Image: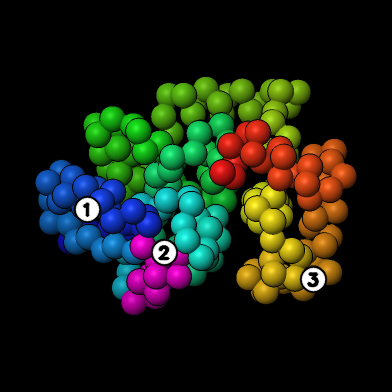
Amino acid sequence: MTRVLIADDHALFRAGLRQFLVESLPSVEIGEAASGNETLTLLQRKAWDLLVLDINMPDRGGLDILRHVKAGHPGTRVLVLSGYPERQYALNVLRAGASGYIAKDAAPEALLKAVRMVLQGRRYVSDSLAELLLLDLDLGDKPLHTLLSDREFQIFGKLAAGQGVSEIGRELCLSVKTVSTYRTRILEKMRMKSNADLTSYALRNEIIQ
């Protein structure tokens, strides 16, 4: 029995993906989570072979969940299925431990290929993402946010969304001083001066909406 947990806040999307996986995979058990906290609860209750994760989840972001899975559930592979453009999130998601990243508008055959590859313990990247990974080797042409570590990118997203350092510290179990240090480092790496600059950059590059 293969156990797959679908984490997405849209009920119709979950229902469609559930039906697709049941019809495409032999002997599969499907679970569903509509929020970040519900995802973490279900991960604690049962061992899952695959987590199909939307990066934009209510109450807890996909990157937070991904870090939690990497630390506490190493047997669960993660395939990120997102509406965000690959260039904005894919590289950081793969660095954070995901086994694959695929866009929500991908063809059904591509999605099934991604699911099967990740379940086999392999990594999945689309042809377009493979090109991005090759371009990533050219250090002179990297988007500023790709210079950030996975933790820095996680905090960058929260700062850009308007969260304060105290709120971020409580959410990530970090001290205010530690979050402030990360903020300073992020601003330096991205050559910016304020949180407003981070927000403007994130909106222009479709990292937040």
Dot 1: what SS?
Answer: helix
Please provide the residue range marked out in magenta: 34-45
Q: Is disc 3 placed on a helix, strand or loop?
A: helix
Give the amino acid type for the residue marked by disc 1 in the picture: Ala
Q: Is residue 124 visible?
A: no
Residue carrying label 1:
15
Q: Which residue is mark 2?
A: 35
Q: Residues within 10 Å of mark 1 (few under 14, many from 20)?
A: few
Residue at x-position 22% and y-position 53%: 15
Q: CA distance from mark 2 to mark 3?
A: 26 Å
Q: Is residue 168 left or right of residue 178?
A: left
Give the mark nearer the N terminus: 1 vs 3: 1
Q: Is residue 60 magenta?
A: no
- Depth check: 37 or 164 in front? 164
The image's mark for residue 111 is none
| Mark 2 → mark 1, Cα distance in angstroms | 15 Å
Residue 57, percent across and down?
46, 57
| Amino acid type at image mark 2 | Ser
